[in-house]
Image (cartoon, coloured by chain):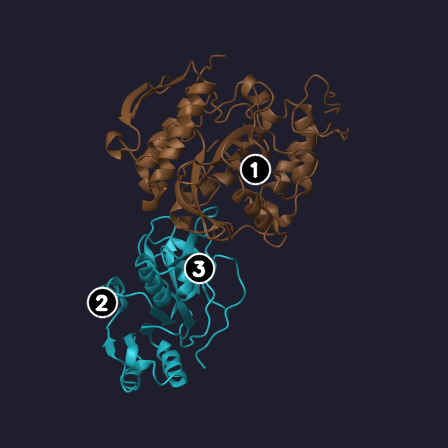
Chain colours: A brown, B cyan
Amino acid sequence: MTIQFNDETFRDDYSFHNSDWAIKRFPFPFHEDSYMYAVNMEQHRGGPEGSVYEKRFDVDEHYVAEMRDRAMVLADDPLRCQSLPHMTLAGWDLLELIMVSKSEDYPDLFELHHDADQWRWVNKPLGIDDTFTFLDETTLPYGPMEYITRQTQGDFCVLDQREENLWMDAGMVTTQADWSLDFDLGMNFFEWHAPVPLAHEMGIFKRALKFLLNIQQGAPARRMNWTMTVNPLLDTSPENYHKWGIQKTTLTPENIGSKQHLRVELQTFFRLPRSNALVFPIRCYLCSFQDLMTMPKWGRRLHRVVRDLPVELATYKGFIDNRPMMLDYLSQFDDGLPTSPGVFPEPETEPPLNKAG
Amino acid sequence: MSKFQFPESIKSRPVYGTLEPRVGKFHLMIADAEGAEAILELAAQDSALMAKSHIIFIPNGTDYGDQLKALNPAQYYEGPSYAASVQRIRHVLANAHQGLQVYLTGTEGLMGQAQNEAMQAGIPHTFIQTEHRGSVARRMQCVHCKGITEDVMTDPFVCSHCGLNLFVRDHYSRRLAAYQGVCIDAEDPGNVPEPVELYK
C-alpha cells in the first residue's frame, strides 16, 4: 500500500488531520470502559493487517510532517537530542535496527544496501540517499542515533542496562507528554518516573523494570499510555510549557470536538545487540474528539473512562480543569449501551449511537 | 540544632545520611557553612582520620574555620565560594587514587555540585557520603531557560535568568545538581500565589 503523506502542521495553524484510514487504525488505548495503571506489556510481534501494531516501526500519513516538526524543534532547542559518551554504540545498534526493519517492512519507501562496511540508505519520502561507513560517526551528518531518529516517527529513549536498572543515557525527545530529556538524562528507571503518582505505591514500576530487564534480542514488547492534548501539538514539552500551557484554556463547548485530542503513546521496547542497551520508542498518535466519536464504541467508552478516572490521574495528565467540559461533550455520545471488549472500533458490529438530541 | 529532617518525597529526591568514618587511603571532605559541624563530629569519632584528610571548606559567612583548622587535617583549604573552589576540587578528584573516601556536608547545592564532580571523576554516587546541615535552600534549574538559580528559599520564586515565576518541584537531577522549576502561571498568566518559605 502506498501512503499519501499529509502536508500539515503541528503548530501555529494546526492543519494536522487524520484521514478515515488513520481514524480507523488509531490506537485507542482503552480495552474496557475504565482505566487504571497497569504494566500491560505484550509481545510486539505484529498485529492485525493495517493496524499500527503490524510493523516494527509504524509509518503513517503524518511521517513527513512529523519529521519536519522535529527538525524545527531541534533547531530551536538542540538539547532535545542528547547522548552520553558511552551510548554511541547503542546509537549504531538503533540505526541498524530501524534501517533493517523499515527496509524490510516498507520496501517501496526505504532501501538499505550493504557492501561490507559501506552502507547505502535510501529514504524516499524524505528524499535522502546517503552512503556511510557503519560504526564510523565521521561519515554521517549527525551521531547515529540523531541521524536515524530524525527520520523516524516517535520519541526514542536509549536506556543503558547496569546495576539491575535502566538508565536514561540517550534520547531524541521532541513529541513528549511533558517531560524533559535534558533534565532526566542520566536518571535510573525509578528516578525518571518519580513524579508519576500512585504507580510507585502499586508496585507498577518494580514489576515493569523486572520485565524490561529481561527483554531479549528479537523479542520486543509493547504497551500503551495516553494523555490529553489541546490542539494537535506534538511538542508538549516542559521547556515550552510557558508558551503552550495557555492553549489549554482556549477550549469552549463549541470547539472542544475539534480542538481536544486524545494523545496515545505506543511504547515499544527492543533489546539492542552490541550494546545490550534497551531502546524505548514512544510513538505519539493524536486524534480529535470529534474524529473519535465517529466510532460509536469509542464514543461510549471514552465518556466512561474520562468520567470515572481518579482525580490524581486527571490532575497528573493535566486535564482536571477541562474535565467537566469534556464530559458535557462526551456524554452526548454515550447512550448507555454495553461495549464489546478490546480496543478495536468494530464499526461493522457495534450498534450505532441510540440517543435523541 | 542545624539538622533538618526533610519530609519524605518522590524517588528522584536525594536522601542524606550521617557522615561516618570509613576505611580509606585518603579522605576528601567538602563542606559549606554549618557542614563544618558534621566534620567536627566526624573527626571526634576517629582520631586517626584527620592525618589523611583534605578539608575544603566554604564558610559562607560562618566562623567555623579556626575549629576545622585546629583538627590538623593533612590539607586545609578555605574557599570564598563554591565556584572559586571547584577547580581545586576537580584537581583533587582527578589525581585521587583507589581508596579515596568522599564526605560531603552542608547545603543541598554544595553537596549536589560536589557529588557531580566526584561522579564525573568516576566515583559512583552511592559510594559518596552526604549529610545535610544548615540552610534548606535549593539549587533550582529553570526548565524553560535552563538557568540555575542558587539558594532558593521560597515557592514560587522568580528565575534569576529569564524572570518567569517558577514553582519548586521535588524532581531532582544529579547530572545538573538541581531541582526542577516550572512556570506556575502558564495557564493563567499573572496569577502567581504569594511565595511561601520552603517546608513551612
Give, as a three-letter code, the residue at label 1: Trp
Residue B189 is situated, as x and y percent measured from the top left of the image, at: 44, 48
Q: Are marks 1 and 2 in contact (CB under 8 Å)?
A: no
Q: Which residue is mark 3?
A: B156
Task: Using the numbered discs, state the Cα–Cα distance from disc 1 to disc 3 in whole angstroms.
Answer: 29 Å
Q: Tag 3's secondary structure?
A: loop
Q: Which residue does the image show at 41% across and 39% down from the upper left?
A: A173
- Depth check, front residue: A158 or B99: B99
Q: Classify the position of the N terminus of chain B by image quarter.
A: bottom left
Image disc number at residue A226: 1
Give, as a three-letter code, the residue at label 3: Pro
Disc 3 crowd rating (10 Å Cα; few below 14, some 14-19, many 20+) is many
- Depth check, front residue: B73 or A230: B73
Eye-nearest disc, 1 or 2: 2
Image disc number at residue B88: 2
Give, as a three-letter code, the residue at label 2: Arg
